[in-house]
Image (spheres, rainbow, N blue to C red):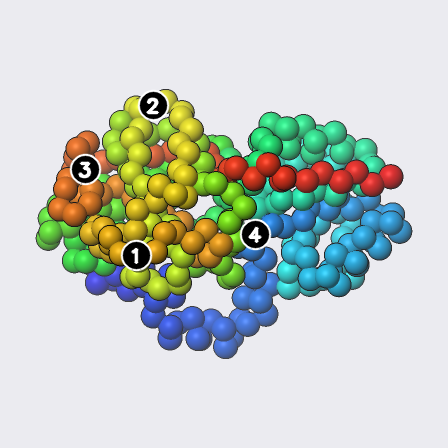
Amino acid sequence: MELKRLWETLTYFEVIPFPLCLKKLFNSESINKNNISSMINLTLVTDNRSPLAQETINNLQEKKTPLRIISSSPTTAFSSPITEIIPFNLETENPPSSILERVNKIIFFPQNGINKLRELVSQNLQQGEIILFDFQTPNQNLRNIWGAVDDVVMGGVSSSNLILGDRRAIFTGIVSTDNNGGFASVRSKNFSQPWDLSTYQGIRLKIKGDGKRYKFITRCEGKWDGISYCYSFDTIANEWIIVDIPFNDLIPVFRAKTLKDADKFNSSKVYSLQLMLSKFEYDGGYNPSFETGGFSLEIESIKAYGNENYPQFVFMD
């Protein structure tokens, strides 16, 4: 059973290349179309089907700008590997907050219903923020990017999952110290291109925990088992809190041992994000609130903060 879980983990995160090669061989078109799913600094465009909107979109595509287009009647002319088209009618539908993921610029064209989008932005984005992952609206992209990495990779038996629930995700499971284990985590796959967050100051989590201490982990290299950069944070049972994680406070770590001579975290090359519950703190120390058994960490959003120049809003008449 544990061997099966280990195989599933390694193939999901493409550590074992053979299954990925088969997928590319038989489904290369869909893989190329998914490139946009983890790209950063998208421009969101509200297409109102006017000649000006069409011209603007064409110009942005010629400049290789990653786009997310909201359109009630999208055309094949919009097709591009770095363009995501959201068939959506602002006049009759309420936009989900997930359309703001990884968007740092919004171009508004006049149309009925545009105030819905403006209200959505004001409710979910403060000056200087960008939404990296929005868990308020479950979508297939989240299922394709996030997966469990538990101590089964080291021989343990802990198990966890990221459940997409009602306006939040829940990182939950059972952690055990059997077989020298003691950690459970959920991690994103490596992004199709590393994210450049160098103009931001850090990561902002909106979470509700169970009183336990967790770790936020990120990486600035694409290795599966390379150097990670960690930040431990405490939760308050059953209370929503904001946790700000300055990039300068991230600790370079390799398998729970700090690396005194490692470079500081390079926020211009962010390859993945991870949340973990672990028995271990750093250098042989123990997590003071660790307990075996069940745990639960609810997540509403993961953002980057501290860039006063974004998001940008452009209103086209």
Q: Which mark is residue 238?
A: 2
Q: Which amino acid type is shown beneath numbered disc 4? A: Ile
Where is residue 59 shown, x and y percent of the image? 79, 58
Amino acid type assigned to the residue bearing label 2 in the image:
Asn
Q: Who comes first in sequence, dot 2 or dot 3? A: 2
**Which quarter of the image is occupied by the N terminus?**
bottom left
Name the outermost residue toward the left: 179
Say few, some or many: other residues with alpha carbon within 10 Å of mark 2 (under 14 / 14 to 19 / 20 or more).
Answer: some
Location of residue 250 in the rendering, given as x and y in whole percent from the top left corner: 34, 44
4 or 1: tag closer to the N-terminus = 4
Q: Residue furthest front?
A: 261
Please tell me whether mark 2 or mark 3 is closer to you in this view: 3
Q: Nearer the viewer, residue 234 or 245?
A: 245
- Residue in the image at 16% along x and 58% along y: 155
**Dot 1: what SS?**
loop
- The residue that label 1 is drawn on is 262
Residue plotted at (60% across, 27% down): 123
CA gap, disc 1 and disc 2: 37 Å
Q: Quadrant location of the C terminus?
A: top right
Is residue 76 depicted above or below 157 in this figure?
A: below
C-alpha span from label 2 to label 4:
32 Å
Q: Nearer the viewer, residue 15 or 63?
A: 63
Residue marked by disc 3: 287
Residue visible at 67% across and 44% down in the picture: 105
Q: Residue at x 45, y 36 (%)?
A: 204
Mark 1 or mark 2, whichever is nearer to me:
1
Residue type, numbered disc 1: Ala
Counting labels gives 4
| Between marks 4 and 1 in the image, the one whose residue lies nearer the viewer | 1
Q: Which mark is residue 40?
A: 4
**Left or right, residue 201 beside residue 312:** left
